[in-house]
Image (spheres, rainbow, N blue to C red):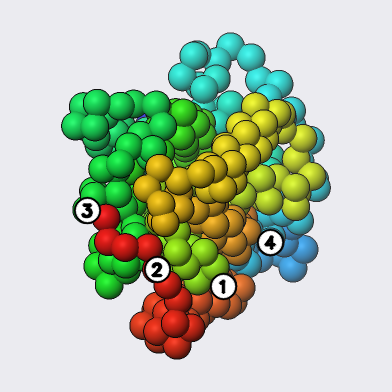
Amino acid sequence: MTPDASFSFFICFCIQLDPENTGYISTEKFRNLLQRHSSELDPHKLEVLLALADNNSDGKICYQDFVNLMSNKRSNSFRQAILQGNRRLCSKALLEETGLSLSQRLIRHVAYETLPREIDRKWYYDSYTCCPPPWFMIAITIVEVAFFLYNGVVLDRFVLQVTHPFYLKNSLLYHPQLRAQAWRYLTYIFMHAGIEHLGLNVVLQLLVGVPLEMVHGATRIGFVYIAGVIAGSLAVSIADMTAPVVGSSGGVYALISAHLANIVMWWLCVTYCFISLSVSFEFGRAVWLRFYPSAYPPCPHPSFVAHLGGVGVGITLGVVILRNYEQRLQDQSVWWIFVSMYMVFVLFAIFWNIFAYSLLDLKLPPLP
């Protein structure tokens, strides 16, 4: 029986178990229904249903909770019930299951790399269909590589492109003299300092971004990525006012910091030595390049502050998104707090760019 068919089948039975339309189902009748038709449900979804039944000591189960479960729309109160019921589960962990195909092992690996709770891992393992695929991170990576190759051909340089005297003439990168051109606060991600800069960013955003998108979807991961990119350029316009900005590090660092913070908060033991070393090396490279003698004085080389702007987004908005797998973000008060903080920061940066440069009488580098 297909998932949609099993959904309709169980909904019909549950309606019969609630003839008076009270919105609740007897726990005993519900458990008997599960036992009679257990073969028609995914084993992990059955496990969650039984945990829900065991957790309700008042003898009733909310009908809407059951509908939410079967339609993959879980409420926050439902998650809390499952987490409490999870203490009673005694089946083996997903990692211990054998006889899985290559694709199933890949999905299991993604679940363990991105989700800290075992119950969420099993839920994701049963629910993932690869439709739609993780298109956002792959598409943005392809576009970044394409622009880099194009610039490499035009400048006849692929290593340390940023040192070419005509590098700053590109209309995509952020330049303080051209800060009124709003698109530059976003399009600078398509320019990179060199192949060493692009290579690290591409590896990191594919290694971290694609698994996160497989779990949380393109909308949420794309939001964190773009928010980190915009926060990065705005942070540079406030804290490093004379420097240009290039590279996708703001978005990459937003994803990485959100993921690592989520892991630390839940004490999840995940080996991320390569990512940690890569992040450290890439940030060190950015700091070194910023203070290296410029190839086009008096304008300095691109700033590293965008990395820090991305981290700020990751440990606020990003962590809330990653901690609320399959949850409605609009129901989370902390989500609205961080969204409000982000909007205040954006508005402050806009006013700063309009008024602060003239009030401070700052001497900016000439136009490229």
The percent position of residue 91, horizontal first and vertical second, equals 74, 32
- Circles 2, 3 touching at the beta carbon (< 8 Å): no
The percent position of residue 132, horizontal first and vertical second, equals 31, 39
User: Which mark is in front, 3 or 1?
Assistant: 3
Mark 2–mark 1 Cα distance, whole angstroms, equals 33 Å
Mark positioned earlier in the residue sequence (2 or 1):
1
Q: Is residue 57 above or below residue 29?
A: below
- Circles 3, 1 touching at the beta carbon (< 8 Å): no
Numbered circle sitting on residue 364: 2
Check disc 1 and report the residue beneath it. 338
Check disc 4 and report the residue beneath it. 80
Along the horizontal axis of the image, is 176 left or right of 280? left
Q: Nearer the viewer, residue 348 or 30?
A: 348
Q: Residue at x 41, y 32 (%)?
A: 160
| SS for dot 1 | helix
Q: Nearer the viewer, residue 320 or 81?
A: 320
Q: Is residue 273 above or below residue 58?
A: above
| SS for dot 3 | loop
**In this rendering, does residue 51 appear at all?**
no
Mark 3–mark 4 Cα distance, whole angstroms, equals 50 Å
Q: What kind of residue is marked 3? A: Ser
- Circles 2, 1 touching at the beta carbon (< 8 Å): no
Q: Quadrant of the C terminus?
A: bottom left
Numbered circle sitting on residue 171: 3
Q: What kind of residue is marked 2? A: Leu
**In this rendering, does residue 312 appear at all?**
yes
